[in-house]
């Protein structure tokens, strides 16, 4: 008994030293090496369904098996839940399931199109877009389906919300200038919206970095779609993909070091991962089917 106590104390001491020195890359509530880190959508088995895989492309597993269109998966911050959209009940709804695909249930239950879910960092809310009030606006809802709340009210379509790490702001995109889309920032408490990009091109699919310092998005301002990062005030916009093919739908990893995205550079839509500065771009799917909408934990 004394020996066992001593061993426990030793393990605890080692863990705290590792934490203090920052050497805990694989520690935490998720991210063991055997766990799939990547979610994506593919029609390789017929209908668009949601799959998971390891970040080296191995271990592909189909999580949804409906004959309908299941799309836009999003990891919860702790990696235990997945939100996604599906039209299996007749129109697009937001669903939640466990990381292994079990317990799939409809959260929104509204006859309008409910799309593009994103968990709040604490997992207590899901932001999404819906046209239930006439055109697409940003909403939030509790994962049990209660407490739906509209956050934006503008005649253009607002979509693809992503929370700031402090949950006070949400970035999204839409054609508010009536000509092309741009990235906007909503300060929730102030109910104030700020335009972050001012370009005569399409700026789409923003996502806030987990360390709060950057927003990643896609834009075709350079003649083809590229992945860009910028500061949350819109400054320092720079191309980190730099590839003549289409690069789109970027997603920060939960720890912030990596970004997954879609590219057509190898002939059809495939999933890629790169470091957050754009280095080490590598393909992780290799399938003639449509592979897209990655989420990386
Ligand atoms: Ca719906
Ligand atoms: Ca624009
Ligand atoms: Ca490109
Ligand atoms: Ca493919």
Image (cartoon, rainbow, N blue to C red):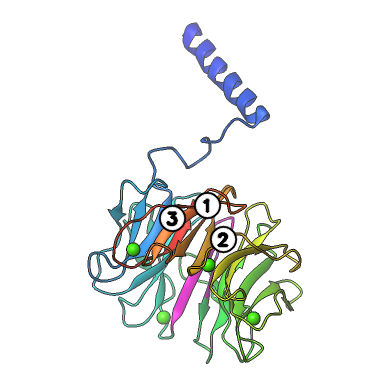
> What whole-number distance in Å separates the C-alpha atoms at marks 1 and 2?
9 Å
What are the residue bounds of the magenta stretch?
113-128
Residue drawn at (46%, 58%), measured in percent from left and top? 295
Secondary structure state at the residue bearing disc 2: loop
Q: Which numbered disc, 1 or 2, marks the residue closer to the eye?
A: 2
119 vs 177, left or right, is left
Q: Is residue 200 above or below residue 17?
A: below
Q: Residue furthest top?
A: 2
Q: Is residue 2 above or below residue 123?
A: above
Label 1–label 2 contact, CB within 8 A: yes
Secondary structure state at the residue bearing disc 1: strand
98 vs 137, left or right, is left
Residue matched to label 3: 81
Residue matched to label 1: 274
Label 2–label 3 contact, CB within 8 A: no
Secondary structure state at the residue bearing disc 3: strand
Evaluate whether residue 165 shows in this view: yes
Q: Which numbered disc, 2 or 3, marks the residue closer to the eye?
A: 2
In the picture, the disc for residue 241 is 2
Q: Is mark 2 within 8 Å of ligand 3?
A: yes
Q: Quadrant of residue 212?
A: bottom right
Residue drawn at (63%, 78%), measured in percent from left and top? 151
Q: Is residue 3 above or below residue 236?
A: above
């Amino acid at each position: 008994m004394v020996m066992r106590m001593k061993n426990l104390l030793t393990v605890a001491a080692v863990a705290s030293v590792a934490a203090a020195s920052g050497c805990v890359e694989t520690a935490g509530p998720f991210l063991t090496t055997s766990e799939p880190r990547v979610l994506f959508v593919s029609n390789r088995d017929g209908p668009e369904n949601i799959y998971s895989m390891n970040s080296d492309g191995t271990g592909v597993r189909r999580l949804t098996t409906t004959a309908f269109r299941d799309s836009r998966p999003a990891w919860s911050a702790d990696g235990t839940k997945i939100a996604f959209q599906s039209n299996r009940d007749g129109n697009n709804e937001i669903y939640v399931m466990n990381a292994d695909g079990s317990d799939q249930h409809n959260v929104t239950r509204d006859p309008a199109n409910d799309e593009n879910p994103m968990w709040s960092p604490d997992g207590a809310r899901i932001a999404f877009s819906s046209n239930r009030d006439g055109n697409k606006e940003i909403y939030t809802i509790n994962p049990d389906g209660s407490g739906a709340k509209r956050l934006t009210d503008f005649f253009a379509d607002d979509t693809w919300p992503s929370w700031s790490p402090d949950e006070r702001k949400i970035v999204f995109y839409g054609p508010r200038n009536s000509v092309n889309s741009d990235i906007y920032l909503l300060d929730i408490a102030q109910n104030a919206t700020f335009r972050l990009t001012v370009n005569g091109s399409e700026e789409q699919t923003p996502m806030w970095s987990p360390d709060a310092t950057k927003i990643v998005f896609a834009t075709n301002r350079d003649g083809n779609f590229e992945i860009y990062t910028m500061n949350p005030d819109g400054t320092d916009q720079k191309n980190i993909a730099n590839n003549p093919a289409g690069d789109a739908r970027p997603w920060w990893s939960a720890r912030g070091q990596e970004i997954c995205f879609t590219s057509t550079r190898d002939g059809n839509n495939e999933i890629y991962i790169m470091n957050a500065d754009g280095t080490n771009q590598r393909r992780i799917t290799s399938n003639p089917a449509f592979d897209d909408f990655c989420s990386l934990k």
